[in-house]
Image (spheres, grey):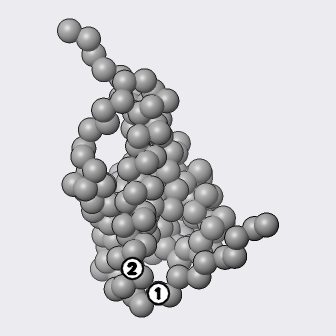
Amino acid sequence: MTKHKWVKVHLMCGMKTNVVTAIEITDRYAADSPQFEGLVKTTGRNLTMSQVSADKAYLSSDTLQVVADHDAQPFIVFKANSTTSKNHSAIWKRAFHFYSFNQKRFMDCYHKRSNVETTFHMIKTKFGDRLRSKTRTAQINEALCKVLAHNLCCLIQSMYELGIEPTFWEEAA
């Protein structure tokens, strides 16, 4: 019996439309946290973010700072043993105090992170939860095609639901 190698998709998506704004594909054993900065930077190059939610696996001063550098407010849940100390950065202390003293508001914003689970569910439901390709390159291309098709579906739906009129550029000569 041969074991198939598989890839892991990391993504960032919009809260209202579920459009995937950034994607990283790694091998199956890659940690989630190192992908965070690239996803935020890619999204920040193309869109204006006001909030970024992530689970506690992504909690660090660096992740809080990369979100703040893009003029967005981070909503990353603190671990049970998290504290503020002299070793923590100013952004960590601000975020921790907001988390500690505004629990309801913080959790309301944080729970928007479930949209990413909805986005994965949408992709898997429409296009299948498995990749059929055998090679790594083909698997990456197949995963990217599924996300592209998902984005097209979301954009068409958003045009009708949100009343967005598409603007098409003239063809370049």
Above or below, 24 against 170 in this view is above
- In the displayed orientation, state which residue is furthest to the top: 1
Using residue 147 as the reference point, say whether residue 73 is left or right of it.
right
- Res. 93 image quadrant: bottom right
Above or below, 23 against 95 in this view is above
- Residue under the point 37% across and 24% down: 134
Cα gap from disc 1 to disc 2, whole angstroms = 7 Å
- In the displayed orientation, state which residue is furthest to the right: 173
Name the amino acid type tagged 1.
Ile
- Residue under the point 46% across and 37% down: 140
Q: Give the residue at mark 2.
A: 158
Q: Quadrant of the C terminus?
A: bottom right
Q: Give the residue at mark 1.
A: 164
On the question of residue 57 being in view, the answer is: yes
- Res. 109 image quadrant: bottom left
Tell me the crowding category of disc 1: few under 14, some 14 to 19, or many 20 or more residues within 10 angstroms, Cα based: few
Q: Earlier in the sequence, mark 1 or mark 2?
A: 2
Residue 85: image location, x then y, percent: 53, 56
Residue 137: image location, x then y, percent: 49, 30
On the question of residue 85 being in view, the answer is: no
* Marks 1 and 2 close (CB-CB < 8 Å): yes
Closer to the camera in the image, 24 or 74:
24
Name the amino acid type tagged 2.
Ser
Residue 50: image location, x then y, percent: 53, 77
What element does badge 1 sit on?
Answer: loop
What label sits on residue 13 in the rendered view?
none
Tell me the crowding category of disc 2: few under 14, some 14 to 19, or many 20 or more residues within 10 angstroms, Cα based: some
What element does badge 2 sit on?
Answer: helix
